[in-house]
Image: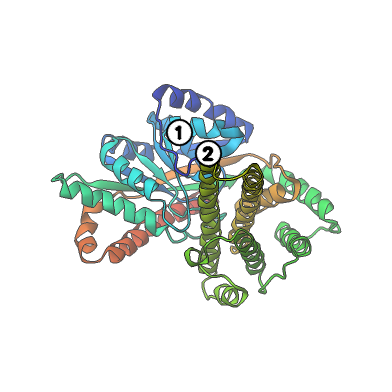
């Protein structure tokens, strides 16, 4: 299991995968509608160094982007979290690489191989790079969360490298928003799903509004997590309580495996209470998510060292058979912990989602979908949805380079704010348009 997986783009494999996209859209009762202006903007940016930046509210965002690629008649490339490449015994990763995806190991320390791959791709590839700069699925369509700073730095570094090579070609950023709208058949389907979740948790049935019933399910979920993990949730709000349990379990995993504390931010109970009490709830969720990614990052690197040690000992005969056996058993136990960390990540996404008031069917759909996966281990169809895709104004990175030369962090902040404002403006425009319709 390599830490970094490079893209191995194959036009035939990519084309074959894109032909299956309509099938998966129908299977998941999802329709994608990209605006003519968005498709025209993609056409105008052909053969340019361009990065497409999407909001990331929904687990179906990658499928919606694949359909956008098909509608545009253009293959994109993608940066994806390392853990996604191991699905279906590696088959998923094999296909992803040949469709133009490469991996990034999130958290600290920074994945330098992925960083260099990003910079070189932007400079030399001639294809557009797709990123979800918020990092994780947010479950929200009311706000664009702060973008990952390393990602912005890599894009700016690519523009700087072009300039140093004597090339004045700009790197373009295309902010794009995806907005999901639940159709009429979604209400009964969602209510049916809620009924089954309540039954699973032993919650008495009621005629309360959907939002109230969903909140009761989340509260019951937290109660069960406390009992099973033996952790006491901290905070008054549902999102705080979820975040605190996830942080405590991640800390236990880190300590149990002797992961280097100096490379993982401290989230002891005292620190955790300060983080959760932050006036900006999104900030608290971001800190806990970065902590989780760092634990996974270090566990992955620890596994890599263990594998090398076993291979070396077996080759050089520096250890007896029993020592090799012990190391192999530890290796298996560590590998199993990734499933636990994946579960924690899904709970953190749920925590992000419930920070937004459940006031629309679109938002309720996402929260119910996340709860269903966690409580039952699978998801069911919950009515038809439409994913609308619209692009905002293009950004030319050359305009940020004077600021970049003065202060790298200052330029990163400027790009972050500009991209977020443009995506949110497009998202709000689509919400208003379809709310009226």
Where does the image place residue 364, in percent across and percent down from the top left?
65, 54
136 with respect to 112 (left or right)? right
Asked if marks 1 and 2 touch (Cβ < 8 Å), the reply is yes
The reply to whether residue 365 is visible in this rendering is no
Q: Residue at x 67, y 68 (%)?
A: 241
Q: Which mark is residue 33?
A: none
| Residue 209 figure quarter | bottom right
Question: Which residue is disc 2 drawn over?
Answer: 85
Answer with mark 1 or mark 2, whichever residue precedes in sequence. Answer: 2
Q: Residues within 10 Å of mark 2 (few under 14, many from 20)?
A: many
Where does the image place residue 271, in percent across and percent down from the top left?
56, 75
Instruction: Say what secondary structure mark 1 lies in.
Output: helix
| Residue 328 figure quarter | top right
Q: Residue at x 36, y 62 (%)?
A: 417
Where does the image place residue 258, in percent across and percent down from the top left?
58, 61
Instruction: Say what secondary structure mark 2 lies in.
Output: helix
Question: Which residue is disc 1 drawn over?
Answer: 97
Of the pair 320 and 131, the residue shown nearer to us: 320
Distance (Cα) linking label 1 and label 2: 8 Å
Judge whether 318 appears above or below 214 on screen: above
| Residue 234 figure quarter | bottom right
């Amino acid at each position: 299991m390599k830490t970094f997986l490079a893209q191995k783009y194959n036009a035939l494999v990519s084309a074959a995968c894109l032909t299956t996209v309509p099938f998966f859209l129908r299977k998941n009762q999802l329709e994608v509608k990209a605006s003519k202006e968005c498709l025209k903007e993609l056409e105008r940016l052909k053969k340019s160094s361009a990065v497409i930046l999407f909001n990331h509210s929904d687990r179906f965002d990658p499928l919606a982007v694949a359909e956008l690629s098909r509608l545009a008649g253009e293959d994109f490339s993608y940066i994806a979290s390392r853990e996604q490449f191991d699905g279906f015994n590696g088959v998923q990763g094999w296909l992803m690489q040949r469709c133009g995806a490469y991996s990034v190991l999130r958290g600290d320390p920074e994945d330098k191989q992925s960083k260099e791959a990003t910079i070189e791709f932007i400079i030399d590839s001639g294809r557009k790079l797709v990123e979800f700069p918020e990092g994780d699925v947010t479950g929200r369509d009311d706000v664009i969360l702060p973008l990952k700073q390393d990602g912005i730095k890599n894009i700016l570094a690519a523009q700087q490298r072009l300039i140093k090579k004597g090339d004045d070609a700009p790197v373009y950023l295309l902010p794009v928003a995806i907005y999901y709208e639940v159709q009429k058949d979604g209400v009964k389907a969602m209510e049916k799903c809620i009924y089954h979740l309540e039954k699973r948790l032993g919650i008495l049935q009621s005629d309360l509004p959907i939002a109230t019933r969903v909140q009761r399910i989340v509260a019951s979920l937290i109660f069960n997590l406390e009992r099973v993990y033996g952790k006491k949730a901290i905070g008054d709000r549902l999102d705080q309580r979820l975040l605190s349990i996830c942080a405590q379990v991640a800390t236990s995993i880190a300590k149990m495996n002797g992961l280097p504390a100096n490379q993982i931010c401290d989230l002891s109970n005292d620190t955790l209470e300060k983080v959760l009490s932050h006036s900006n709830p999104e900030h608290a969720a971001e800190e806990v998510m970065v902590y989780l990614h760092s634990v996974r990052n270090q566990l992955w690197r620890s596994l890599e060292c263990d594998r090398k040690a076993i291979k070396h000992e077996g080759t050089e005969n520096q250890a007896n058979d029993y020592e090799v056996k012990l190391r192999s058993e530890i290796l298996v136990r560590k590998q199993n912990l990734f499933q636990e960390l994946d579960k924690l990540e899904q709970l953190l996404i749920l925590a992000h989602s419930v920070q937004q008031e459940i006031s629309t069917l679109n938002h309720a759909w996402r929260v119910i979908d996340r709860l269903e996966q966690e409580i039952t281990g699978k998801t069911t169809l919950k009515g038809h949805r439409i994913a609308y895709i619209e692009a905002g104004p293009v950004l030319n990175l050359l305009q940020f380079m004077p600021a970049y030369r003065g202060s790298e962090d200052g330029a990163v902040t400027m790009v972050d704010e500009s991209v977020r404002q443009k995506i949110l403006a497009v998202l709000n425009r689509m919400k208003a348009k379809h709310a009226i319709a």
